[in-house]
Amino acid sequence: MEGLTELLFPNTCVICEDLLIQHEKGICSICRFNLPYSSWNFTDENPVVKALWGRCAITAGFHLLSYRKGSFASSLVHAIKYQNQQQLAIAMGEQMGEKLMRTETYKTLDCVVSVPMHPKKKKTRGYNQAELIASGISRVIDKPFYADFLLQTRNTQTQTLRDRLARQENAGDKYQWNVNFSSESINHILLVDDVMTTGSTLEAAEFAIRKQFKPEKVCVSIATLAYVF
Ligand SMILES: [Zn+2]
């Protein structure tokens, strides 16, 4: 039966479409090796951190891949978002976890949380890729992942289409901290998303955490699979 499934739905690389061998998930080893990896580490003054300067209070941040239109990174992100590549999303999260562990700062993290997706959208897609990436990170760095830490309150249209001012006005109540989580034992949160473009989504999510936790009480750091240049 397994052979028949493979014949009907051959397991191919999302980038080069070559047949995958057994341990490869979604992407072949050659394409994985050739992905446009960022050379910045978690605690560097990297593009993620710089883009959010003056907008939110983050402790550290990083991106795994540098996303440019038509690049391997864009094919990979597209597959994760729209081609049901859930295992690939988790595997990329694991790679992000390995990168986090290059600096000691990850040891201070208490938990991993993801930017939420509106329940309607999640139902249509069947999964939230940011959650899968976050769960991969969590597994590698051995810190708990809380899927429902943040909740989406409004189903807003794609925010990148709006101007900056409107986004800021709009960001205030897009997400909400889930009151079922106790703030007692949390000092450092890793906030995860799949792609960072303008940063407005992460800014809104950080804002929701900040409404609950004062900066002197809780640090927020950010990890994103891809950063769009
Ligand atoms: Zn390939």
Image (cartoon, grey):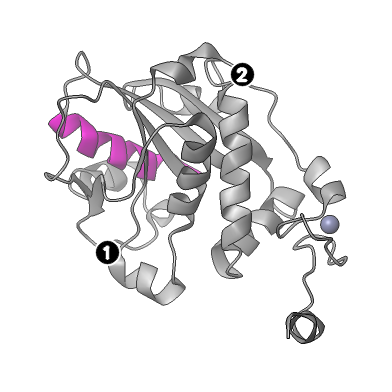
Disc 2 element: loop
Quadrant of residue 158 within the rendered picture: bottom left
The kind of residue on which mark 1 rests is Asn
Q: Which residues are magenta?
A: 195-212
182 up-or-down from 104: above or below: below
The percent position of residue 178, horizontal first and vertical second, equals 17, 46
| Left or right, residue 132 beside residue 92 | left
Label 1 belongs to which residue?
155
Label 2 belongs to which residue?
102
The percent position of residue 94, horizontal first and vertical second, equals 59, 40
Determine if residue 197 is in view. yes
- Residue 34 colored magenta? no
Disc 1 element: loop
Q: Residue furthest front?
A: 1
Q: Residue at x 16, y 21 (%)?
A: 214
Quadrant location of the N terminus? Answer: bottom right
Nearest to N terminus: mark 2 or mark 1: 2
Nearer to the camera, 184 or 114: 184
195 up-or-down from 191: above or below: below
51 up-or-down from 160: above or below: above
Q: In the rendering, which numbered label is found on residue 116?
A: none
The percent position of residue 172, horizontal first and vertical second, equals 19, 43
The kind of residue on which mark 2 rests is Arg
